[in-house]
Image (spheres, coloured by chain):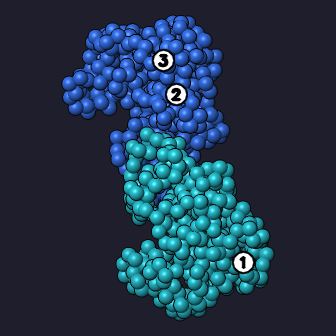
Chain colours: A blue, B cyan
């Protein structure tokens, strides 16, 4: 079958790989019908050192179940399913507590003998704990929005939950990438009163405003901090969604948080230590978040997507076939596209 | 009047200073009947550079109201009152939200023209927002425990709240100083099932066990981490109370937190950046806490102290008069005493 492999920074190829197949009795074999490129895929795209065998890529996908192992009980052949970006057993203590990303038996797509999502098919380990069946046909018009449940909308939601967004809260979202935009949507969904998006790309901040942003701050660094303080009577916001992952973005997030507020981090951190240990202490600012337990959020977010109340799929502004994936990476890296949908 | 002044590391003097007196209509004049030395006073005691005018010391006290300004409404002459370690107006947005340490008009004792608590008397700004009247006589046997509401027990409670201690939680407390011991007591009060104290001073860990600690870990660094993991089935604890303030202690706290858990920091940070930005992200560990909003907790904690259910005052193991304060600092620094009570 065909699948995406990254060999080093800038070198993404679609090539023949061994066919996905059932190996464990708890596996499902899924033919991928939609996948996408993640902002986090761009970190190795910028920095990965050469690996002779490359890395299988992609961790967001929807597909049709072609086969199941004998122990799979809740998923059947023919089901249209969405996979979260981490697989998990659904039964361990962490899964039970709503943190499937720390599952005792789970793992990441594309690692070891597990397929990546940017390919024709995927062997899904722990299918019962991992997959969620969708009550739609495989080419339903809702596909782009349903696909965001796999990662990007779930991650925006995790940022909002981690930043403790409540009814009436003041919120700032640092970053106008697809996760930041989904963070705006999630904060709006949770009842935030004021949502300030920090971003400088008009096409993106326009979507943010459609998603519920009340203010746009195009400034950066100290000027952005000043502007957010102006917009909030000098206090800063209750909740900051940090959707970038750079140290500078985290520093900005901390400085615009109101005393007693919280920063929800979902940008994969490209830094080792969190700056501002004393400032956050003096102002009692909480730092929370991490990799989003998407699987735990899908059931909560699904109805709003199925019933068309929310349209997170608007973050996809380009679609490619499988052979077009390398150009999809390039388009996202060059900021030609916010997020690229893959239709194998 | 006599009061404590620190001139540089190791140089604490009790000397004559101008008498405390009412200056603003919202002030109260309080004759100090109990005060104490704080673990945080030891940071300048170790590192303060010489200051010709010195710094007035002390931020925890109980006393009797001798006079009030014309605008003070809730406190009367003769009241026995406890002061939290930050004064606050009680009416601004942050006070209303339960964060009086970020009060728009508040401040710290011993700064500018505000007296410190380690002296004969204190001018208390914003008396209505700051002081809490106690229904006891000035020499009541409960005085040591009541005094802990000023800071140390409130701070232990803040660590527990910030670390999200819940009924049935597994908890670790890093540090066996007075705050750590009060953290144990607070975690026990909130219903923690397992409370592991990390400390190596037997006299202190004995008190911790009386306060509700179920396990003592005397190891440090990597060995302590291993031991806590052994004690918790390999998972780590839901809640870690970081009651030291050193980078190493924070690092330990982070490593013993369970995925999805929280670290409540109340040790005044002697570091600029929080290590482990990636580890906390991967495991969704929340970092919370800061300077404790003691004033907001006093009403919640007071009944348990007044009715004798909790005895946080056991952290005081030495009492000095005002002239004995310098030796009290020395005794705490030399770990001869856990915490020193001052009876002027």
| Viewport quadrant of the C terminus of chain B | bottom right
Q: Position of residue A289 (x, y in %)?
A: 49, 41
Position of residue B335 measured from the top left corner of the image (x, y, whole percent):
47, 78
> Whole-Å distance between the Cαs marked 1 and 3?
65 Å
In this view, B303 is above or below A271: below
The residue under label 1 is B142
The mark nearer the N terminus, 2 or 3, is 3
Residue B321, horizontal then vertical, whole percent:
59, 90
Task: Name the quarter where the N terminus of chain B is drawn.
Answer: bottom right
Residue matched to label 3: A25
B172 is higher (above) or lower (below) than B78? above
Residues at badges 1 and 2 in contact (C-beta under 8 Å)? no
Q: Residue at x 54, y 37 (%)?
A: A94
Chain containing mark 3 = A
Q: Secondary structure at mark 2?
A: loop
Return the x and y of residue A259 as percentages of the image width and height. 55, 54
Residue mark closest to the camera, 2 vs 3: 3
């Amino acid at each position: 079958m065909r699948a995406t492999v990254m060999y080093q920074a800038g070198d993404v190829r679609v090539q023949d790989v061994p066919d996905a197949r059932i190996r464990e009795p708890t596996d499902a074999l899924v033919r991928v019908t939609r996948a996408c490129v993640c902002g986090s895929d761009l970190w190795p795209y910028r920095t990965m050192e050469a690996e002779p065998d490359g890395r299988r890529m992609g961790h967001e996908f929807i597909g049709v179940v072609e086969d199941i192992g004998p122990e799979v009980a809740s998923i059947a052949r023919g089901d249209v399913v969405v996979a979260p970006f981490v697989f998990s057993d659904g039964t361990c203590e962490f899964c039970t507590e709503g943190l499937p990303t720390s599952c005792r038996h789970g793992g990441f797509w594309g690692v070891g003998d597990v397929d990546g999502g940017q390919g024709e098919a995927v062997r899904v380990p722990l299918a019962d704990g991992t997959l969620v069946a969708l009550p739609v046909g495989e080419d339903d018009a809702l596909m782009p929005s349903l696909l965001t449940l796999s990662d990007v909308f779930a991650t925006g939601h995790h940022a909002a939950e981690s930043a403790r967004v409540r009814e009436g809260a003041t919120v700032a979202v640092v970053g106008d990438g697809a996760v930041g935009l989904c963070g705006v949507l999630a904060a709006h969904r949770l009842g935030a009163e004021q949502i300030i998006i920090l971003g400088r790309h008009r096409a993106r901040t326009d979507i943010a405003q459609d998603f519920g942003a009340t203010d746009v701050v195009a400034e950066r660094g100290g000027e952005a901090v000043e502007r957010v303080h102006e917009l909030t009577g000098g206090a800063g916001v209750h909740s900051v969604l940090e959707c970038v992952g750079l140290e500078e973005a985290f520093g900005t997030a901390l400085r615009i948080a109101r005393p007693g507020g919280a920063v929800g981090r979902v940008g994969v951190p490209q830094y080792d230590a969190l700056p501002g240990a004393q400032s956050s202490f003096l102002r009692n600012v909480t730092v929370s978040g991490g990799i989003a337990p998407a699987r735990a959020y899908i059931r909560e977010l699904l109805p709003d997507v199925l019933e068309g109340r929310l349209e997170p799929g608007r973050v996809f502004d380009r679609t490619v076939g499988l052979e077009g994936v390398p150009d999809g990476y390039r388009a996202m890296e060059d900021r030609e596209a916010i997020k690229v949908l893959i239709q194998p």
